[in-house]
Image (cartoon, rainbow, N blue to C red):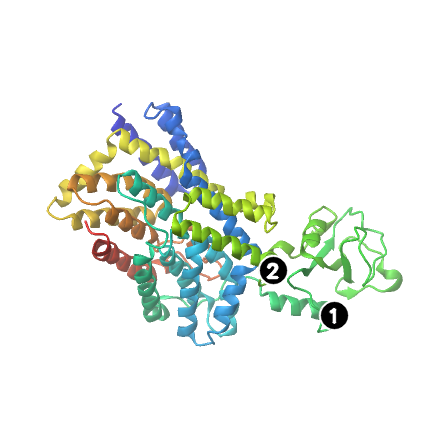
Amino acid sequence: MDPVVTTLVILALAIVAFMSNRVPLGIVAIGVAVALWVTGILDLGQALAGFGDPTVIFIAALFVVSEALDATGVTAWAGQQVIGRAGTGRTVLLVVVCLLVAAVTALISVNGAVAALIPVVVVVATRAGVAPSQMLMPLAFSAHAGSLLALTGTPVNIIVSEAAADAGARPFGFFEFGLVGVPLVAGTVLIIALLGRRLLPNRAPTILPQDVSAHARALRGQYSLPEGTELLGVRRGATEVVVAPRSSLIGLHLFPGMVTPSGDLVVLAVQRAGEDLVGADSTLQAGDTLLLGGGWDELERNTAGPEVLVVDDPARIRRSVPLGGGAKRAIGVLAVMVVLLATGLVPAAIAGLAAASALVLLRVVTPTQAYRSISWTTVVLVAGMIPLSTAFITTGTADVIAGGLLSLVGESTPYLALAAMCVLTMVLGQLISNTATVLIVAPIAVVVAADLGVSVLPFMMALTVSGAASFLTPVATPANTMVLEPGGYRFADYWKLGLPLLLFFLLVAVLYVPLIWPF
């Protein structure tokens, strides 16, 4: 079979598998790499080259940095500080939420920023008497716009920057994305502020994230603790556990104020069926509830075994405590990484690896925490799809598609070719991962620019803008999916606000980008 046809068949099967949602994304990507080798399109080294690509390594390192900022309460603190000063007015609060998530996204990626700020936004919206459904979709959509503020905003930025360099142009600067990102954020916030009230539903959420301060008050009330008792602080916390069946704790005599058998935690309260246990009745039975206090690390370690069933995971509660242990170290490492990336003193992958390693060595995150923080689905997806981009170039598939595109729109003006490429990217981006979409379209864009004899830079930047315009479905990006249940959204809610934003992104990509990066 002709190599071009084979490559297109593999692409078509991958798109079908992506859209089916029945095959894990990582398996599809691995299947693409293996299929390219089995069919002889690529040799073994080329088929597996993506797993050692510097872009993939840098993306993996950024997940560790994001985890450090989230786990130490830096993002929770930033959210509380900014949103807490916004008052209770709907429009002002909405604008502040959008600007905040855009700024955070520029440093720790779309998914990390949205995941960290969902609880804060829901709590603040509820206190202000605003339905969370009026805030959470703008949160996700503004994060997409904010991903264009800096190189670290999304893996797509890293991919197109490397693609531009490989095409003989130059990589984009760390803050160069902001030349298009700032107008995108401003326009996104304006559209949301003007149209959001009418286009967003007023709906009760199906799931509400936990309000830490309310949780502390509930614990004090449940266990009749003094009001001044600090339950959730920077270094120490508290958690409820239930004595498990067949637990070795059954039969022990525990009472408030004593130290647990491990010697690490203090028993703050003991209850059975909602009543305090006192005297002889305080011999533990299966199903009894304990309120334990101690250092966060000790809480996580001593409640992880089979002896007790944890009601609220200490690790999850700890993330919502502003500026917890290690926060200053995390901020310092982030600042150094940004300086290295902005100045170009070292390659991006080296800066990312150095930052991730420093966070582990400084004990901001544990090695296990660092490994778990990496979205291996994203890493494998990018690594597995990079060989497909290689195949597009080596087999001439990109030339064939680019030739068809140019014959359709003509060669009189590069604007039409740019518009066609952006529309293709936006359509695919609603159905499959925008990262996978960009990896597919990037080699086509390079060939189109070469055939037209123009710079590849506007095509790469427009590709980034188009890839960020994943607004029409809840499955377009993980960030869109994250806000689905907390906002009480339905599938059809997304396109109502998403369509005006998508058209705005298309206009920016086609008309504004070439003004900054001329053909």
Residue at 76 percent of width and 54 percent of height: 264
Q: Is the N terminus in the top left, top right, bottom left or bottom right quadrant?
A: top left
Q: Are marks 2 and 1 in contact (CB under 8 Å)?
A: no
Q: Residue furthest front?
A: 345
Q: Amino acid at mark 2?
A: Gly
Q: Is residue 481 visible?
A: no
- Residue at position x 33%, y 54% from top? 177
Q: Which mark is residue 64?
A: none
Q: Position of residue 94 (x, y in %)?
A: 41, 69
**Residue 233 figure quarter:** bottom right
169 horizontally vs 298: left or right: left
**Dot 1 corresponds to which residue?**
225
Query: Residue placed farthest to the right in the image?
Result: 280
Q: Amino acid at mark 1?
A: Leu
- Residue 437 rendering spot, x and y as whole percentages: 33, 43
Residue 138 point in image, percent of width and height: 40, 63
Q: Write down the residue under mark 2.
A: 324
Left or right position of 55 against 359:
left
Q: Which residue is at the front of the view, 42 or 494? A: 42
Name which residue lies at 26% across and 28% down. Answer: 395
The 10 Å Cα crowd at callout 2, few under 14, some 14 to 19, many 20 or more, is many
Residue 64 visible at all? yes
C-alpha distance separating marks 2 and 1: 23 Å
Where residue 146 sits in the image (x, y, percent)?
38, 58
The foreground one among 368 and 190 is: 368
